[in-house]
Amino acid sequence: MRKWMGMLGMFICFLFCGLSVKADVIWEPYEDSFYRNHWEECEHVDRSYRANGPGGEVILYESPESAKEITRWENSTSGYISFTYTDANGVVWGVYNNGDVRESGWMPMEYMVVVYDSISFAEEFADVIVEESGALDAGDYTEVYFYSWPGAEHAISMPIESYVPEYHRVFVDEKGRRWGNVSYYYGMRDSWICLDAPLDAFYELWPEGAPQRGEEIPEPPADGDWIVPGSVEENKAPFVALIVGGVVLVTALLLVILKKSMKK
Amino acid sequence: MYLIEMFLVSLFLTLIIEFAVTWLFGLRTGKAMLLVLLVNVLTNPLAVLINWLCRVYLPEIVGAGIGKLILQLVIECAVVLGEAMIYRSFRRELQQIKRPFLLSFLANAASWLCGTALNRLL
């Protein structure tokens, strides 16, 4: 008995250990009931997207199976999409969740354009980025600028702690400077440091402005091509209409009976 | 689940408010309250169904803003008219029903306003 209890205890510990690791690694929108029921079918995305829908906006719905509208985003509004779900019709839906149910919902990813990021950069320059490992020559540096990609305006200045940042991929920019891709450094993931000028901020690196990265935002789809979580709702419509029709008929009959009974 | 909630919550809230308004109009007997119940069971699910179908099939027109408001008002007008006609047909049987159109208008206006306010708050 004691042996079984011990094994049960170990099993429970194992379950909870797994949960805590998962929660530590990726954030999940557990407030969203659709996500809770379909998390196994959802794909982790973890990127920011910009609205680019027909008619100048994108509608956020309660779920990929509910046409209940939560809110609308004007085109160019951007938000963090944590997971996507592909419905039975092959439509990919992304979930935006900021903890407020009045602002969180699901949107068709066809109407979203990814905000240029380190993944976009790696894809765009895949043929010139080379595998090369090394560590930043710390020298006299006490802090270093970490960029999302070489040419990104926004950077985070980080003090060099007990160990120097290590890189595993190198990119040579338009001015011949070498950049190293750092997978992880004190919470910073997939960022770039300029190996030749790690202390330089954006305006020192690119006084005339950074070169254009990525493609221009495509034209939004034509008006009228709206994707609605209708696949399921539309399938339910005849059934729901039939039930309501039945209720109406029975109630009308009861009203006639009530009227006759009151005449007597 | 969402659909069941949508129909039941709407009917439940409408019944509470319309019972209160018709009570004020003197419809307090068992048969009068049964009439109010049946009238609402007849019109409310139909109104919710039409509203939902329009939202599913015509989201770009009635999904939000002025289109949504116009759709709701058109449906409410039809409901007011329908309920008023039923109440009027019961005038002989229920002496308390003196002004069926006013009764129907006030009952539905109250329930629509409360529903709109609740939607904003929740």
Image (cartoon, coloured by chain):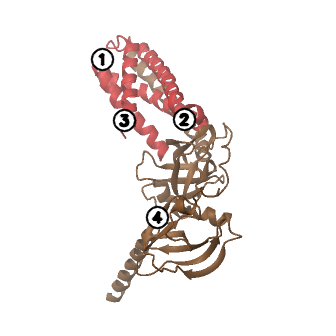
Question: Circle 4 — which element?
Answer: strand
**Label drawn at residue A156:** 4
Mark 4 vs mark 2: in front = 4
Does the CB distance between marks 1 and 3 fall below 8 Å?
A: no
Labels 2 and 1 in the same subunit = yes
Q: Is residue A181 above or below residue A62?
A: below
**Which class describes the residues within 10 Å of circle 1: few (<14), some (14-19), or many (20+)?**
some
The amino acid marked with disc number 4 is Ile
Q: Quadrant of residue B13?
A: top left
Residue A124 at x, y percent in the picture: 67, 63
Between marks 4 and 3, how big is the CA–CA gap?
44 Å
* Chain hosting mark 3: B
Residue B15 at x, y percent in the picture: 36, 30
Does the CB distance between marks 3 and 2 fall below 8 Å?
A: no
Give me the residue at 67% from left, 43% from top.
A221
Give the residue pinned by disc 3. B118
Mark 4 vs mark 1: in front = 4
Give the residue pinned by disc 1. B25
Q: Is residue B83 above or below residue A198?
A: above
Q: Is residue A163 above or below residue B7?
A: below
Question: Circle 1 — which element?
Answer: loop
Give me the residue at 52% from left, 27% from top.
B71
The amino acid marked with disc number 2 is Gly
Q: Is residue B24 above or below residue A212?
A: above
Labels 4 and 1 in the same subunit = no
* Chain hosting mark 4: A
